[in-house]
């Protein structure tokens, strides 16, 4: 066989040299492993605050819903009188799209905001998550209830945050949890009842909303500035728009998803 | 005759118990498959207890998960009883050890099951759990076979030899039908591994639900083709080799299982391809995918039985084997031989190429990523080398250049080498999946598979093998690249292209130099079928020019700068000079020069790229 040694010694040499160079570069890079401690809130003049409102619409024929089979757990099935339908794309009056997560994606960098004290409630009722889409500020408590006479497991599937999986028997105490990092969106599953799904949006500031049954939303108290607003839907993906808000201004944004 | 120590009634009871254990294991595999198909793996968040008790409320997904745990406990208990029974009452040492191995495997399996629950179904662990399940099932099936009256009716010698094939075999190279079946067993096992990867990587889809991971799916499809060919080949050989109706029934069973499996695979694909729209797992889908898993397991077990039966009934083969003396090596020599088996120099070269990929892909090199890539690639590359030497052990024995290798020289037995190679490949893939990312693991595993199951068999069939072999040869750079987490953009592919093209002048020069030796080994390299070497010369020329042409691309796609460009052109001119003279002169000396320049050229080119990295 031929002589590998020339090749090897050359490559080893190159490598030592290259890695030496690499190591120097590396020290400059310090990826923040832990989320930074919440800084004091950036002072904001409440009199300046602007409001963003609007509506998310859906055009085209709405996809058909699917029937959920709850027969694996009688405790679930008997809470519903008829067949249970799941509408992933929920279109309300005048084409309004429900349960879209609308949030300020860009424009608030460098500012920090107080973490709200109040808890966001996520209920498990008749083996369905209520609501299906919720928003949280990083560090804010989410209180997960089990109002069902059956056992659930609560299992969020985050990519940026820590994954956990906990069981919650009937009448158990609520689970109170927080998420440390911004993440759009964290799916939450119950593996006992695999049709159960909800989505938690975790944002580093309080400027987000979930569209109501008629597709409308409102985000209040924004400081004046230029923003990128993102609308997220579980099936339809995301849409973004830029908007500039002056002091005390109220602007309306229209988002459209199509089927 | 076999053992007379055991009363006939007890022997029969022992056999029946072993059969029951094997059946229970199949039921367990079905139960495990249903857990995955119903996405119920995490419906019980605690382990080893379920909801802090032995009997949780049996609703929804808990039904699947807890039933699986209960059957698993039963099978574990059965394995312990069977092992103890064999240990106390069976005089065959190999069988007693196999019983003990079954217990160890089922324990490891339980712990893996626990890990997957407590760490939220990491795909690597789930895939390992699924693969070990197959190994355990095969173990119980073999125990059922070797305790059977049919098996024990043969001669002691025949029995000892066939068991050796299983545990520490002599190799079955002289037995055509057994080696065909053994090849099928190996490929079916790999295929089951890929199948579990399709299942478990597809299950981690986030908001979009179930997703299929395309490269894994493609590998699984390629595997299906390989399994089809090998199972048909094995079945035909088995049926032809014996007039024994039993063997022919076994061959027919293999073909029937293969057909069902292909059908189920197609149905499972249709079910899963509609996956993203699932709102919940549905029963018919779960039944199809689980049946696909179960039939795969049965096909594996039946093919393994065919290997053992065929070895046992082939008397001629045993006589040959028994009369051939073998030299035993000391422990230290053995360790050295095992190291040698991994082709350390080639492996080091592969590892460094992967490291070059890491370096070129990163803005600033992360030392941890670098170490993980190098470790994982070393395991994979070493394992691939071992299995390659295992597959080519007969050819190697005929070639002067390779006759001193550990396998042809008899310093290591083939079967432990095969197991060693598989363990290395398996742990390398798992390591890469765990410590770098899935894409890297997938590329690595695919590289091994292409090298072993496409390139290696092609070497004795067509001179086009060099073309196929150039893919795995260039892949380590891609692995390094993908491990950094940067996507495989055009810069990665340019790097791949250069390494790919470089292999041609390099290997054509080697095969020109060693063409007589290759002919002895039965390999078909271009220079062998091309006596005057005109075609070889032309090919050297074409690929040398293409490679030098490709070597300017890094400057065009922003991988390297102008310093690199100048250097690459200068180096390219030197390379072309040697390439052209090797192509025109076609002498030993000119080929040797080309080989030498090729191994100097590549590190210099990579150095330039790293120095002038953008």
Image (cartoon, helix red, strand yellow):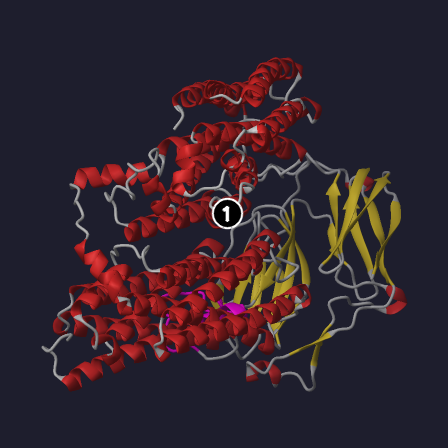
Q: As displayed, is residue B29 above or below residue B197?
A: below
Quadrant of the image for the C terminus of chain B?
Answer: top right
To which residue does mark 1 refer?
A: B461
Q: Residue at x 33, y 55 (%)?
A: B173
Residue A196 can be seen, yes or no: no
Q: Foreground: B308 or B208?
A: B308
Q: Nearer the viewer, residue A166 or B355?
A: B355
Measured from the top left, where is residue A170 in percent x and y? 50, 76
User: Horizontal placement of B522 versus B537: left or right?
Assistant: left
Residue B319 appears left or right of A85:
left
Residue at far right of view: A94
Task: Decide whether residue A202 is among the magenta residues.
Answer: no
Q: Is residue B127 above or below residue A147?
A: above
Residue B142 falls in image quadrant: bottom left
Q: Is residue A109 above or below residue A137?
A: above
- The correct choice, above or below, for A159 with respect to A87 in the image is above
What residue is rendered at 79% in x and 42% in y? A228
Mark 1 neighbour class, 10 Å CA radius: few under 14, some 14 to 19, many 20 or more:
some
> Which region shows up in magenta?
B31-56
Q: Residue furthest front?
A: B532
- Nearest to the observer: residue A239 or residue B341: B341
Element type at mark 1: loop
Q: From the image, which quarter does the N terminus of chain B lie in? A: bottom left
Q: Chain of mark 1?
A: B
Residue A117 appears at what percent x and percent y?
61, 52
């Amino acid at each position: 066989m031929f002589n590998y040694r020339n090749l090897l010694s050359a490559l080893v040499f190159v490598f030592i040299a290259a890695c030496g160079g690499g190591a120097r570069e590396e020290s400059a890079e310090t990826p923040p492993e832990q989320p930074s401690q919440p800084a004091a809130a950036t002072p904001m003049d409440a009199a300046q605050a602007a409001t963003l409102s609007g509506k998310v619409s859906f055009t085209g024929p709405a996809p058909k819903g699917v029937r959920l089979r709850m027969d694996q757990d009688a405790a679930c099935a008997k809470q519903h009188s008829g067949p249970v339908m799941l509408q992933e794309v929920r279109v309300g009056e005048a084409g309004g799209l429900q349960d879209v997560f609308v949030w300020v994606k860009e424009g608030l960098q460098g500012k920090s905001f107080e973490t709200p004290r109040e808890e966001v409630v996520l209920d498990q009722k008749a083996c369905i998550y209520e609501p299906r889409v919720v928003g949280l500020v990083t560090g804010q408590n989410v209180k997960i209830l089990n109002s069902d006479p059956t056992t659930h497991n609560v299992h969020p599937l985050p990519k940026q945050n820590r994954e956990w999986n906990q069981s919650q028997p009937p009448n158990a105490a609520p689970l109170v949890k927080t998420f440390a990092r911004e993440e759009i969106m964290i799916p939450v599953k119950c593996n006992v009842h695999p049709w159960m799904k909800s989505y938690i949006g975790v944002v580093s500031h309080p400027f987000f909303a979930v569209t109501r049954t008629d597709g409308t939303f409102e985000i209040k108290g924004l400081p004046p500035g230029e923003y990128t607003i993102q609308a997220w839907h579980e099936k339809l993906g995301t849409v973004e728009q830029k908007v500039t808000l002056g002091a005390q201004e109220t602007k309306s944004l229209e988002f459209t998803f199509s089927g | 005759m076999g053992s007379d120590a055991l009363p006939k009634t007890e022997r029969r009871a022992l056999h029946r118990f072993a059969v029951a254990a094997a059946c229970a294991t199949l039921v367990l595999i079905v139960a495990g498959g249903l857990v995955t198909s119903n996405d119920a793996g995490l419906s019980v968040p605690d382990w080893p207890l379920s909801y802090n008790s032995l009997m949780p409320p049996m609703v929804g997904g808990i039904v699947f998960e807890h039933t699986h745990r209960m059957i698993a406990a039963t099978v574990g208990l059965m394995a312990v009883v069977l092992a103890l029974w064999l240990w106390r009452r069976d005089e065959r040492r190999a069988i007693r050890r196999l019983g003990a191995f079954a217990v160890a495997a089922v324990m490891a399996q339980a712990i893996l099951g626990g890990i997957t629950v407590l760490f939220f179904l990491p795909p690597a662990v789930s895939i390992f759990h699924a693969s070990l399940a197959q190994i355990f099932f095969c173990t119980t099936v073999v125990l059922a076979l070797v305790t059977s009256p049919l098996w024990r009716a043969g001669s002691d010698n025949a029995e000892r030899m066939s068991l050796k094939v299983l545990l520490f075999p002599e190799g079955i190279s002289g037995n055509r039908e057994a080696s065909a079946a053994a090849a099928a067993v190996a490929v079916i096992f790999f295929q089951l591994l890929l199948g579990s990867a399709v299942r478990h990587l597809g299950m981690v889809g986030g908001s979009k639900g179930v997703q299929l991971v395309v490269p894994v799916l493609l590998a699984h499809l390629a595997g299906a083709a390989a399994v089809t060919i090998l199972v048909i080949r094995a079945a035909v050989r088995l049926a032809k080799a014996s007039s024994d109706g039993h063997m022919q029934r076994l061959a027919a069973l293999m073909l029937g299982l293969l057909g069902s499996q292909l059908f189920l695979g197609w149905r499972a694909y249709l079910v899963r391809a509609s996956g993203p729209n699932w709102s919940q797992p549905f029963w018919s889908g779960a039944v199809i995918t689980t049946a696909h898993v179960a039939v795969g397991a049965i096909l594996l077990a039946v093919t393994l039985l065919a290997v053992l039966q065929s070895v046992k009934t082939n008397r001629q083969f045993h006589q040959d084997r028994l009369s051939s003396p073998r030299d035993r090596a000391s422990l230290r020599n053995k360790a050295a031989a095992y190291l040698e088996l991994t082709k350390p120099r080639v492996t080091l070269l592969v590892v460094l190429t992967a490291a070059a990929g890491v370096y070129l892909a990163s803005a600033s090199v992360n030392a941890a990523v670098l170490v993980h890539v190098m470790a994982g690639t070393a395991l994979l590359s070493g394992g691939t080398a071992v299995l390659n030497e295992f597959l080519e052990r007969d050819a190697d024995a005929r070639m002067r250049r390779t006759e001193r290798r550990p396998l042809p020289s008899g310093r290591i037995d083939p079967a432990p080498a095969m197991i060693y190679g598989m363990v290395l490949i398996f742990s390398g893939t798992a390591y890469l999946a765990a410590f770098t990312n899935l894409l890297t693991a997938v590329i690595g595993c695919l590289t091994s598979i292409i090298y072993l199951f496409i390139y290696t068999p092609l070497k004795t069939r067509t001179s086009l093998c060099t073309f196929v072999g150039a893919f795995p040869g260039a892949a380590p750079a891609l692995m390094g690249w993908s491990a950094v987490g940067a996507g495989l953009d055009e810069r990665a592919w340019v790097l791949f292209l250069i390494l790919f093209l470089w292999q041609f002048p390099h290997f054509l020069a080697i095969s020109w130099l060693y063409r007589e030796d290759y002919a002895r080994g039965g390999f078909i390299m271009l220079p062998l079928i091309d006596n005057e070497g005109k075609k070889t010369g032309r090919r050297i020329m074409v690929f040398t020019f293409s490679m030098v042409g490709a070597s300017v691309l890094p400057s065009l796609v922003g991988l390297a700068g102008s310093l690199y460009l100048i250097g690459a052109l200068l180096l390219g001119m030197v390379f072309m000079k040697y390439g052209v003279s090797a192509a025109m002169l076609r002498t030993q000396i000119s080929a040797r020069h080309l080989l030498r320049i090729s191994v100097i050229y590549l590190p210099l080119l990579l150095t330039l790229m790293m120095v002038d990295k953008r």
